Amino acid sequence: MKPTLEALALIALATPALAEPCRDLTHDGTSYTVCEVTAPADLRLWWQAPDGLPVATFERLQAGLAPGETIAFAMNAGMYHPDRRPVGLYVENGTQAAPIVTREGPGNFGLLPNGVFCIANRFAVIESRAYAATGPECRFATQSGPMLVIDGALHPRFVPDSDSLNTRNGVGVSADGDTAWFAISNAPVTFHAFARLFRDELGAANALYLDGSVSRLFAPGLGRADTGAPMGPIVGLVAQAR
């Protein structure tokens, strides 16, 4: 998407003082943008602003940061209801704002197994029922689905010749939990192709689908600020402004 004037102004304001976390790459002929985060890092989730309304846009996200903070990158971080409430589990600053959902259901979210992306001292993608059973402590967490990679295996429902093509974004985590990769496709892809990006190109042990069609990325180091409808939960890396 071509950035609007407002998005270009946001890029100009967000100049993080750290190495550029995002890069473009091609896997099996499809272009992706991948943003890599290594623990410890100031990776956060946002849903509601202090005024009680959803943060909803990258502009409001940047405007709500503390003085001296800026966004190194951000993207939408899970499915949401029409009023932008998270569909499943949502934890922000250690407080649970929405409960976990473990039942099978319609749509991508209910295509079990689905999972939870957890931010603590390290990162984790945990299958939702395993999360509900163990109750790990997460500083931030968002639930989505389906899982893309499950302990090194692709989701069993994915097929290479699917006709379901969409712009998609998701998150994968290394086996040791030290690295998280956030990826967005720059062209429509199948679930199977998107999952293989995480497993075969990035080496993620587990990966989680965040959303499709509404997928958007803000990466000021790449001059990118996708626009579109207001979002639900947002994930982003915070840096100190120059």
Image (spheres, rainbow, N blue to C red):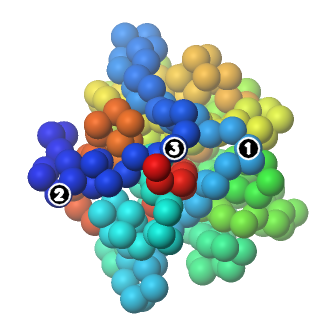
Q: Residue, x 61% and y 17% (percent of image)? A: 200
- Give, as a three-letter code, the residue at label 1: Ala
Give how far across and how far down residue 140 sits, in percent.
66, 64
Looking at the image, is mark 2 or mark 3 nearer the viewer? Answer: 3
Of residues 64 and 167, the one nearer the viewer is 64
Disc 2 is placed on an element classified as helix
Disc 3 is placed on an element classified as loop
Q: Residue, x 34% and y 33% (percent of image)? A: 222
User: Dot 1: few (<14), some (14–19), or many (≥20) neighbours within 10 Å?
Assistant: some
Give how far across and how far down residue 163 sits, in percent.
32, 28
Q: Residue, x 76% and y 58% (percent of image)? A: 120
Question: Which of the two labelled residues, at mark 3 and mark 1, occupies the earlier sequence position?
Answer: 3
Q: CA distance from mark 3 to mark 1?
A: 17 Å
Q: CA distance from mark 1 to mark 2?
A: 32 Å
Disc 1 is placed on an element classified as loop
Is residue 86 visible to us here?
A: no
Q: Which residue is mark 1?
A: 39
Give how far across and how far down residue 191 sits, in percent.
46, 32
Give how far across and how far down residue 210 sits, in percent.
49, 49
- Give, as a three-letter code, the residue at label 3: Ala
Q: Residue, x 40% and y 23% (percent of image)? A: 24
- Give, as a three-letter code, the residue at label 2: Glu
**Mark 3 touching mark 1, by CB under 8 A?**
no
**Mark 2 touching mark 3, by CB under 8 A?**
no
Q: Is residue 130 left or right of residue 223?
A: right
The label on residue 17 is 3
Of residues 94 and 113, the one nearer the viewer is 94
If the image is split into quadrants, where does the N terminus sit? top left
Q: Is residue 61 left or right of residue 208?
A: left
Q: Which residue is mark 2?
A: 6
